[in-house]
Amino acid sequence: MPAATIQQFFGATATLANTVLTIDLDDFVGVGLTPTSTSAAEIFTAILLRIKANTPTTAIDDPLWGVIVGDPFLSIVRDNSQLDTQFPVSVYKPFNGSALDPDEVVG
């Protein structure tokens, strides 16, 4: 499988022109987002769920993918009133001893 595309992470109509990334919230309906949402947390969650749905399970499955979102861990928190959903996110870069730099991510 080739490296991830902008559309696989941000939706079928996502575009990157020069330095401007444009996404359409309609592209996230499939992961449960209401397209009229203005909540940053809801939009971020929709992006995370879309990336999860469109990535391989591990880098072993496909070493060209630089970001992989794993299966969530669930726990009940805050006096049993909220569900905490934690996703492991793996970011792959060359092993060169330096700190994580977005410009070095595989793909």
Image: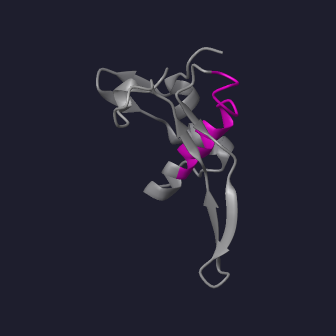
Image quarter for residue 20? top left
Which residue is located at x 59 percent, y 48 percent?
88
Q: Quadrant of residue 82?
A: bottom right
Compared to 80, does 44 lie above or below?
above
Which of the 4 image quadrants contains residue 98? top left
| Residue 43, placed above or below residue 63 | below
Q: Position of residue 11 (x, y in %)?
A: 55, 32
Residue range highlighted in magenta = 45-62
Using the image as rendered, state which of residue 67 and residue 7 is in the foreground.
Answer: 67
Residue 30 x/y as whole percent = 68, 42
Looking at the rendering, in which quadrant would you find the N terminus? top right
* Residue 53 can be seen, yes or no: yes
**Does residue 36 show up?**
no
Q: Residue at 49% across / 49% down in the picture?
A: 44
Residue 70 location in percent, x, y?
Answer: 65, 43
Is 53 contained in the magenta span? Answer: yes
So how many labels did they put on this image?
Answer: 0
* Apparent side of residue 41 relative to residue 69 in the rendered image (left or right): left
**In the depicted structure, whether residue 6 falls above or below residue 79:** above
Which of 106 and 11 lies nearest the eye of the viewer?
106
Query: Is residue 12 shown above or below 46?
Result: above
Q: Nearer the viewer, residue 12 or 66?
A: 66
Coloring scheme used: one colour
